[in-house]
Structure formats: C-alpha cells, structure tokens
Amino acid sequence: MGSLSDHLPSVRGKLLFNAPLAPQTWFGVGGAAEVLFHPADDADLADFLKNLPPHIPVIALGVASNVIIRDGGVPGVVVRLGPAFGRIKTDDAIITAGAAALDVNVAKAAQTAGLAGLEFLSGIPGTVGGGVRMNAGAYGRELKDVLISARCVDRSGIFHTLNNADCGFSYRHSHFPDDWIVLSAALQGQPDDKAAIAARMKEIHNKRSSTQPIREKTGGSTFANPDGHKAWQLIEAAGCRGLRVGGAHMSEMHCNFMINTGAATAHDLETLGEDVRTRVKNHSGVDLRWEIKRIGIGTTQR
C-alpha cells in the first residue's frame, strides 16, 4: 500500500510528519502524530478531506486543554486549526467565532462589544470548536445556552450549518458525528454595561484562581459530574485527593483535576484516572465518566 505520505492530497497549508504532540498539549505528554495538518483555510481543509482515502483516520485537535495524547502517538492525520480559524467578529448582538478561537478571547470580545451572557467562557480553558463539540460549560452556563448555529465540515469535505436544535446538546455532549470538524460558531449575546460584564468576568477569574490548579500542567475537570452528584465529592469520599501514579496525581486543591508534576507519562495519567474510577465505583457505586478525551495508541486502552 505504500507509506501514508503516498496517499495524501496536495495542500496549501502544511503537512508535518511524525510531529511531536506533547508540546502542544496542556498536560505535556504523549507521542507524535503520524501526520499533522495545518490547513490554510476552510477550502483547503475541505479539499484535503474530500481527496483523502477514506481508510485513513482523521482527528481534529484544538489547544488540547482537555486531552491526553497516549504515549504511542496518533495514527493517521491530526488536523490542527491555526489563526485563520480563530477570527472573532461581532454583528449587533451576535458573536461569530472560528473554531480555533480561545474561549476566553471570545468572552473578552463580547465584553468589548458590550454583550453579556458569554462571561462563562472566560472560565473554560479551551477553544470554541472543542467547546461546541462537548457542550462545554462553567459557572452555571453551557455552550447550548448561547449557540445559534455551528458550521462544520464532514469527512467527505461537505460543509454543514447546524442550528442549536440540530446539535443534540446534553450535559457535556453533542450529536456531532465523530468525523465532523467544527469550523465556527455563532453565539448570542445580550446588550449590557461593559463595566458590569468586566466585573462578572473578574469574579470568575478570581474564583478559578482560588479553587483550581490553573498554573499546573493539568487538563481541567477530569470527570463529568454524574446525575445527582459532584465528581469531586465522590473522589474525595473515596480517598483519592492527592492520589498518585508515577508523575501524575489528583490535585490537593481540586481533586477532580489531574496534574502532571513534570515527569508523568500519558500512561501514568490514564492509569491514575482509571484507579480513581475504580475506587469511586467501589465506594459509592457510581461510574465516573471521563470528561478528558484520550486519543491515540497506548498501553491502557479501556
């Protein structure tokens, strides 16, 4: 069949082979992408997907704030959307943001435009694309509460625009097919006083800083809150605060956050997470669901 490079379409962007991914993740762990693709724009990405043989896997990666790249790396093509996909614009009370736009930058743009309702995005360490796909939320709000529509491209290179109802949002979940890539989202704001919006964003920042290990190598909340429970309380009750595996441990500040102390491998992190899940299950009977995505080839694929 030849090497993977023999089957890749020509592009206007960049194709990198055996590209290290660990430096691009918040955890700082994991192997390399077999191919890393930085598309020039929407059309470049769509043409690439259309002409890429269907047997070659493709996965999109944002700023990898809630991702563990396994130590064996990621086979196939990893798509990393760059600055061309990070533009933010305001039209009346609507903010349109590219998938690569940082959530915090969208919140700042809304505040500058005097639009309220998007302050919660300043407390989410990720990008719009990943946030839409997982219905990210914080401080009582979720993407589903503000999303008007999302523009995507499928594995065949066909563009789609979905309204809120089409997305099938639920807690930390949407119905986007696995092989669709979110390109942009239109978000609804509400006119309000800029100073009042800024004050609410500052309150969120202060709360995050005092309750979450945001200056560590972490990936945000490790597990989603089960119905009727808070994940951190279940983890605490099972005696997992500060639990360690190799260079990975559950934060003393917020025990639903995993931390790479500097020497952790992806194997350490995933093993620690599964240990926590087992202990919580044995203690409370509740199955914790990973909120952090784990992708690639590793030694702990459960």
Image (cartoon, grey):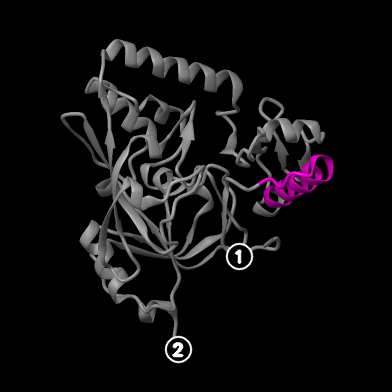
User: Could you say which is closer to the camera, residue 170 or residue 202?
Assistant: 170
Q: Which residue is most to the left?
A: 92
79 is higher (above) or lower (below) than 262: below
In the picture of the structure, the residue carrying the numbered disc 2 is 1
Crowding near the residue tagged with mark 2, few <14, some 14–19, many ≥20 C-alpha atoms within 10 Å: few
Q: Earlier in the sequence, mark 1 or mark 2?
A: 2
Q: What's under tag 1, amino acid-wise?
A: Ile
Q: Is residue 281 magenta?
A: yes
Crowding near the residue tagged with mark 1, few <14, some 14–19, many ≥20 C-alpha atoms within 10 Å: some
Q: What's under tag 2, amino acid-wise?
A: Met
Q: Which residues are magenta?
A: 269-288
Q: Quadrant of residue 70?
A: bottom right
Callout 2: helix, strand or loop?
A: loop
Residue 197, image x and y in percent? Answer: 33, 16
74 is higher (above) or lower (below) than 246: below
Callout 1: helix, strand or loop?
A: loop
Query: Which quarter shows the C terminus?
Result: bottom right
Magenta residues: mostly which secondary structure? helix
User: Could you say which is closer to the camera, residue 166 or residue 138?
Assistant: 166
Residue at horizontal 71 percent and vertical 47 percent from the top: 287
Residue 186, image x and y in percent? Answer: 26, 41
Residue 31, image x and y in percent? Answer: 57, 59
CB atoms of marks 1 and 2 within 8 Å: no
Residue at horizontal 78 percent and vertical 42 percent from the top: 280
Please indicate whether residue 154 sits to the left or right of residue 23 in the image.
left
Please indicate whether residue 35 sits to the left or right of residue 194 in the image.
right
In the picture of the structure, the residue carrying the numbered disc 1 is 297
Query: Which quarter shows the N terminus?
Result: bottom left
Q: Quadrant of residue 13?
A: bottom left
Residue 78, image x and y in percent? Answer: 43, 62
Q: Quadrant of residue 226?
A: top right
Q: Is residue 210 magenta?
A: no
